[in-house]
Image (tube, rainbow, N blue to C red):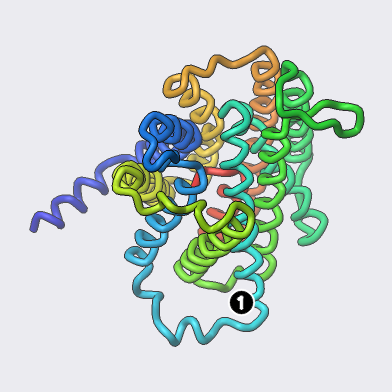
Amino acid sequence: MASGKRTLFMRQIPGQIYLWLAVLILGASSAVTRKITEIGAQNFVGGQNPISLCNVLFVGNLCALLVLLLIHRQQWNRELWSRLSRREWLGLVMVATLSGALAPGLIFQALSLTPVTNVVLVSRLEPPLTLALSVWLLHDRINGWQIMGAIAAFLGVALTVILQPVKEPLMQMAGFHLGVGELLAALGAVALAVATILGKKRLSKVPLGIFSIVRTGLGTMIFFIVALILYGQDHFMEAFSPFLWKWMLLYGAIIVVLGQSFWMAGLRASSVSTASIIGSFTPIAGILAAYWILGEVPTPAQYMGGGVILLGLVFSQVGLHRQMAQMAQCQVSSAQAGQAIESHMGFKGI
């Protein structure tokens, strides 16, 4: 009886409320990650920070995997898994490596080297890169508004990087001095864009539960092995520290469980156009979270680059609305429409 009342109450909440809550939570993930690592730096265990970025990514993925196993437990059966072809398994391994291990690792490393606002803005390379790759490799059709949005996003990211004040660490590329953190964030965006295209091309028929579980589980395993090779067997010594797990359970409950659950609930209860508009505010939520949680005041370069990126978001939304209208006429599935929205949102944390 009580569960029935809760279900009825949830249905009475407008879908837009769930979407806005999800955007606020997921957008704040980078700032929250940086904040809890700073808390760990003030509470060393055995001479090491128990909440290092590697530990956050590793333990956070374990928390996410547990949640996914509970949510998609019905798809955890031998019959469904046996239907996957060798081509699909290869695709899953590639996507898990790129989006479950490489991209989060690069972006988390970027968070340790550059302000969160820079990471949020540079990560906006992912949607236009995905769009360009979908045209090149999948022969998708796009309209002029989407092209203008992609160009504006590239220009905004370029302005953010090039106009940054000189700081360390730096590297020189094509005559420009680029921050290593910004470069790592850009490489992470490239890895996510490639993973998205691989998923669309090879994994469109793989059940969502299996896709999510394999990507998270295999990605966690690959990241763990690579980190051990690069940093040594003592790198995860504090990975099972009670202090770390106390914070990660809170992080996992809010970012992983609430954020993703609110997004899915809102997506089911709202129109595609509403979800796409609200989802486009994720980078804005990330910048505001960096200011409120970390006290990061945007620099002139960030204002200028962010303004151009926001203009690109407006153009992209106009183009996306027209694309969605065409998809509705062609009776495209809601899952495909949802993937189109996700590809315009960019990185949303673990």
User: Which residue sits furthest top?
Assistant: 300
The percent position of residue 182, horizontal first and vertical second, equals 69, 33
Please indicate, yes or no, whether residue 15 appears anywhere in the rendered image: no
Whether residue 333 sits left or right of residue 139 in the image: it is: left
Residue located 51% across and 51% down the image: 235
The percent position of residue 170, horizontal first and vertical second, equals 76, 28
Residue located 43% across and 53% down the image: 237
Whether residue 165 sits left or right of residue 346 in the image: it is: right
Residue located 63% across and 76% down the image: 88
User: Which residue sits furthest left?
Assistant: 1
Tag 1: amino acid: Trp
The percent position of residue 233, horizontal first and vertical second, equals 53, 58
Query: From what the image shows, is residue 319 above or below residue 326?
Result: above
Q: Residues within 10 Å of mark 1 (few under 14, many from 20)?
A: some
Q: Secondary structure at mark 1?
A: helix
Whether residue 15 sits left or right of residue 330 in the image: it is: left
The percent position of residue 294, horizontal first and vertical second, equals 46, 22
Q: Nearer the viewer, residue 162 or 314?
A: 162
User: Which residue sits furthest right?
Assistant: 175
Quadrant where the image shows the N terminus: bottom left
Q: Nearer the viewer, residue 170 or 119?
A: 170
Say which residue label 1 marks.
89
Residue located 49% across and 29% down the image: 285
Query: From what the image shows, is residue 77 above or below residue 300?
Result: below
